Image (spheres, rainbow, N blue to C red):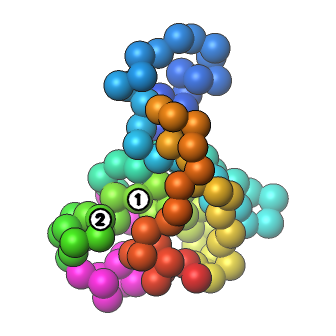
Amino acid sequence: MVVRCKSIRKLNNNKRIHIKDLPATIICAIHNKNYRIDESRKLVEPIADKLKAELLKIGPIGFNNGINPIGNCAENNSANYLMLKKRSIKLKDITFSKAYRPRTAQKIKRCNNCKILFD
């Protein structure tokens, strides 16, 4: 699977990048020895069936329900990668690191959509 997180890839190469090119949020999803650091952005196909079913319970993917657009969080992107890699993973078995805002290096709280999905 191709690494889709362009800005994080650049950070790994020790290149200086402009602050506006950094994502709003990054987080790490962890399941056993597998992990994925990803950023907040639109969730793109393919989407794991289990994740898609849970997202659709909240509302249509991409719909802004007043909290955040459904499926656009870093948690969804990192969990989707792990679930596509190993299809037997359940949402409740995935743990997450603290969420960070790379632009300011501050820790941020997870949105209510993600709390509903993953807690």
Direction bottom: furthest residue: 57
The residue drawn where x is 42% and y is 22% is: 19
Could you tell me which secondary element the residue under label 2 belongs to? Answer: loop
The residue drawn where x is 50% and y is 78% is: 115
- Residue 44: give its label: none
Residue contact at pointers 2 and 1, CB within 8 angstroms: yes
Mark 2 / mark 1, whichever is N-terminal: 2
Magenta range is 45-59
Could you tell me which secondary element the residue under label 1 belongs to? Answer: loop
State the separation of the CA atoms marked 2 and 1.
8 Å
Direction right: furthest residue: 33
Position of residue 63 in the picture relative to residue 117 (left or right): left
Of the residues shown, which amino acid type is indicated by label 1? Cys
On the question of residue 49 being in view, the answer is no
The residue drawn where x is 22% and y is 72% is: 66
Mark 2 vs mark 1, foreground winner is: 2
Prevailing SS of the magenta stretch: helix
Q: Residues within 10 Å of mark 2 (few under 14, many from 20)?
A: some
**Mark 1, residue position:** 73
